[in-house]
């Protein structure tokens, strides 16, 4: 994992790469490759899971903010705010579904 934001794509890449390196190490009897592959796989899984959790939390935030905006728009008669709130709420719900922990 790097100092950047966690990424599902990067995490998955490192997980798969680590598994491949580990397999090569196992097949050739090179324990250093096996160990290195295991470590990279674990780091990749950790990055993927961190990115997934971050996306889920962002979805919760969007849903709450969207719901609030929708209610305020409905109460004040601001159809534009109400619609924008509904859109943000739905976006948050989709984001949660995509990032639901497995």
Image (cartoon, grey):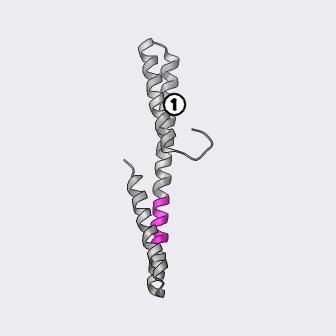
Pick the front one: 25 or 91: 91
Q: Quadrant of the N terminus?
A: top right
Residue in front for this viewpoint, 86 or 11: 86
Residue 62 part of the magenta-drawn span: yes
Q: Which residue occupies the extreme bottom position in the image?
A: 76
**Which residue is found at the position 44% from the left and 83% from the top?**
74
Number of numbered discs on residues:
1
Residue at which label 1 appears: 40
Nearest the camera: 18 or 84?
84
> Residue at the spot x=48%, y=44% of the render?
8
Furthest residue in direction front, as rendered: 80
Left or right: 42, with 94 as reference point: right
Label 1, residues with CA under 10 Å away: few <14, some 14-19, many ≥20: many
Q: Main secondary structure of the magenta part?
A: helix
Q: Is 7 contained in the magenta span?
A: no
Measured from the top left, where is residue 54 in percent x and y?
50, 53
Front one among 84 and 50: 84
Residue name at image x 47 percent, y 23 percent = 21
Write down the region rendered in magenta.
58-66
Q: Quadrant of residue 23?
A: top left
> Is 91 situated above or below 22?
below
* Relative image position of residue 88 (x, y in whole percent): 46, 68
Image location of residue 5, percent across then percent down: 58, 47
């Amino acid at each position: 994992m790097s100092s950047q934001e966690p990424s599902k794509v990067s995490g998955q890449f490192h997980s798969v790469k680590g598994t491949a390196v580990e397999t090569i190490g196992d097949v050739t009897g090179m324990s250093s490759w096996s160990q290195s592959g295991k470590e990279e796989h674990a780091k990749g899984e950790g990055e993927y899971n961190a990115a997934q959790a971050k996306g889920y939390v962002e979805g919760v935030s969007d849903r709450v903010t969207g719901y609030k905006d929708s209610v305020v728009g409905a109460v004040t008669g601001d159809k534009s705010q109400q619609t924008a709130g509904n859109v943000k709420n739905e976006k948050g719900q989709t984001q949660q579904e995509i990032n639901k922990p497995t």
